[in-house]
Every structure is written in structure tokens, then in C-alpha cells.
Image: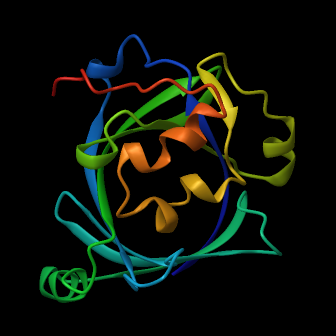
Amino acid sequence: MVELELEKTYLAKYLPHNLLTLRSEVISDVYIPATAEHAMLRLRHKGDTYCITKKVPVSGTDSSRQHEHTIDLSVQEYEALASCSAKKFVKRRYFTEFNGHSAEVDVYQEDLAGLVVIDFEFPSDEAMQQFSPPDICLADVTQDALIAGGKLAGKTYEDIRQELEAYKYQPLGQAVKE
């Protein structure tokens, strides 16, 4: 299946006050090949769903407009492919709304604990262009490869701390108790 994804990504300034009441799911991502600086193939496990996805910018390096190719996998296929790479991370995704816009708040866990990003998806280019981020958004990092999953996978918060501090980002979410 191929979809057009229109999305903006922001570093969170603070956590939503109602975070623990929101619907959420744990997502485990593994990126392959492990040797790539910016791996483009993502294996994803969430709940009882397993898939492989490749995101490709529609034009140039614009990360806000990507073709997303996804194939469902069996657990055996997922495990065989996942064993090929240590480029991975785990996050808990919370589903919410800000100013009438659906949002996904990703609270990274384990080695990336402290990182929280918010994604907004849009039905059209016009809707994306007209979007005004809510106060919870610290900085637009849509075009920053640092936050791209294939670059982030396999890193620790300490590995990216300096780049995040350039945005005046303060670590969040470490105290979130599930």
C-alpha cells in the first residue's frame, strides 16, 4: 500500500496535562540496514501488528510530504528481519487533539527517554500551510534529520542532547509512569 503522508513534527515544550488519560500504544521501531547513517526501511511492532515501511520524500528533501510504502508482516517475518539490526527505539504514542487538530505525542523510552515530539498529519497541502502550531510546540523539526527515525534509531538521549539544546529543548517525560 502506498499513501501520501503530509506531516509536521515539533519538539514538545511540555507534556499535555492529561497525558495519562489519553489513549496510547507502545511502538517498537527497528531500522535497516544497521550500517546506514540514515536507514530508510522501518520495521514496526505495535500491539499484534507487524509491518515494514519505507518513506520517501515526494520531492527533494522535503520531509513534510512523503510517499509511505507499507507491507504487513507475520511475526516470524518481523523477527527475522529485526534480528539484522540494533538500530531501534521504543516510544509510547499518545493520541490527542490541539486546537481542533489531531496529534500524536511520542514519548520516547529507554535510551531516548527525555525526548518528546508531536506529529500533526494533514489532509491537504493547504491545511498544512495554514496550520499554526499550538503553544505546546517548542520548535518545528520537520526538516531536521536529527529527529528522522532512521537517524534517531540506535542513539541515546546523550548522543543528541547538544543538538536538542540548540532548540532550547529541555528533556521531558522521564517521570511518566504507565
* Residue at image point 45% right, 77% down: 53
Which quarter of the picture shows residue 84? bottom left
- As displayed, is residue 133 above or below residue 62? above
Q: What is the x, y in percent for residue 17?
A: 40, 10
User: Is residue 47 shown above or below 77?
Assistant: above
Residue 115: horizontal and vertical position, in percent? 42, 37
Farthest left residue?
76
Horizontal and vertical percent position of residue 66: 68, 69
Q: Residue at x 59, y 19 (%)?
A: 136
Q: Is residue 127 left or right of residue 67?
A: right
Q: Quadrant of residue 114?
A: top left
Q: Is residue 29 visible to the viewer in this orientation of the structure? A: yes
Name the residue: 21% across, 81% down: 78
Q: Residue at x 68, y 50 (%)?
A: 142
Q: Is residue 162 left or right of residue 96?
A: right
Picture layout, residue 133 above or below residue 163: above
Q: Position of residue 128 (x, y in %)?
A: 79, 44
Check the picture and name the quadrant holding the C terminus. top left
Q: Is residue 119 visible?
A: no
From the viewer's side, name the closer residue of 45 and 15. 15
